[in-house]
Amino acid sequence: MEILELLSEYKQLRLKEVIDHEKFNLISIDHHSTRIEGSTLTEVEAQVLINEGKTPKGKPLEESLMVTDHHAALLFVLESALKKKSISVLLIQAINALVMRGTGKIYNTMLGSVDSRTGAFRKGNVTAGISYFPNFDKVERLTIELAAKLNESLKKPLTPEEQLKLSFDAHFNLVSIHPFYDGNGRTSRLLMNYIQAYFELPLAIVHSENKVEYIQALIDTREKEDIKIFRDFMFGEYTALLKGEIERFKEMERPSQGKGFRFLF
């Protein structure tokens, strides 16, 4: 399978790396995941924000908070995966709490108030476009069941392809439960990244320029009850990512062509 060949080539090239490429990849994940949710920061602005703490001029502070909070959640995910922590409701809630730390708000419902900055489950029913999600009173049970199934699968001797499928399925299933008032997409993509980091795989990115196709894949998968639709979309994203990274590594290894670099001053 092409994905296995790409993974092998990527890992071989990755071993030769002499720059902090990993940090760049993490910022790219932050950038695309928050862009999908409405941030207008460019990748360069996200990089300056995370590396230097400088917020971009003329853009809402909330968008910068989305990026820095996502980065904190991503680092938490990687640390948890390195320690081989079990996937639990508390872990998923902790990821969501970090994602929503600076931009969450309080929702007042008939059943009480919910502070979306704490990773608390929703106490009301929600929709997104034409998508309807499970009733709020089913959320906790469904999330517990999902965590249990994922933990059981983590213990099995899975091939890299099966590991990727598990991560994509976790992404789809959590976002389809939609357990929180806010941050479900980011939390679900981070859960996917957790499983990939757990198995020491390159981390997937859903590219923001493919947002329409991404949402359509989620909708079609639910309507047709066919997980292959979402898997195929994610494998497409993953293949494109690996090919791009491999080409970038090769470009760094190539000798300069032509007249070489010139200072333009």
Image (cartoon, rainbow, N blue to C red):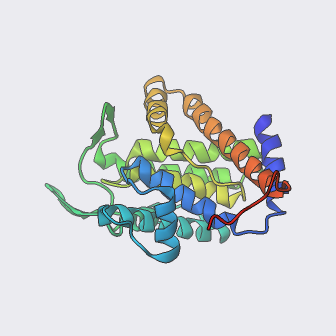
Q: Can you give x and y, in whole percent of width and height, for residue 154 in the image?
A: 67, 54
Residue 174 visible in rendering: yes
Which residue occupies 60% across, 66% down? 78
What is the quadrant of residue 21 in the picture? bottom right
Which residue occupies 50% across, 51% down? 32
Q: Can you give x and y, in whole percent of width and height, for residue 237 in the image?
A: 61, 40
Q: Can you give x and y, in whole percent of width and height, for residue 212 in the image?
A: 44, 34
Q: Along the horizontal axis of the image, is 13 left or right of 233? A: right
Q: Residue furthest front?
A: 265
Residue 135, relative to residue 263: is it above or below? above
Q: Quadrant of the C terminus?
A: bottom right
Which residue occupies 39% across, 62% down? 66
Residue toward you, 183 or 24:
24
Q: Along the horizontal axis of the image, is 112 left or right of 145? A: left
Q: Residue furthest left?
A: 110
Which residue occupies 41% across, 61% down? 96
Residue toward you, 10 or 218:
10
Q: Can you give x and y, in whole percent of width and height, for residue 204 in the image?
A: 61, 49
Residue 158 visible in rendering: no
Residue 88, relative to residue 10: is it above or below? below
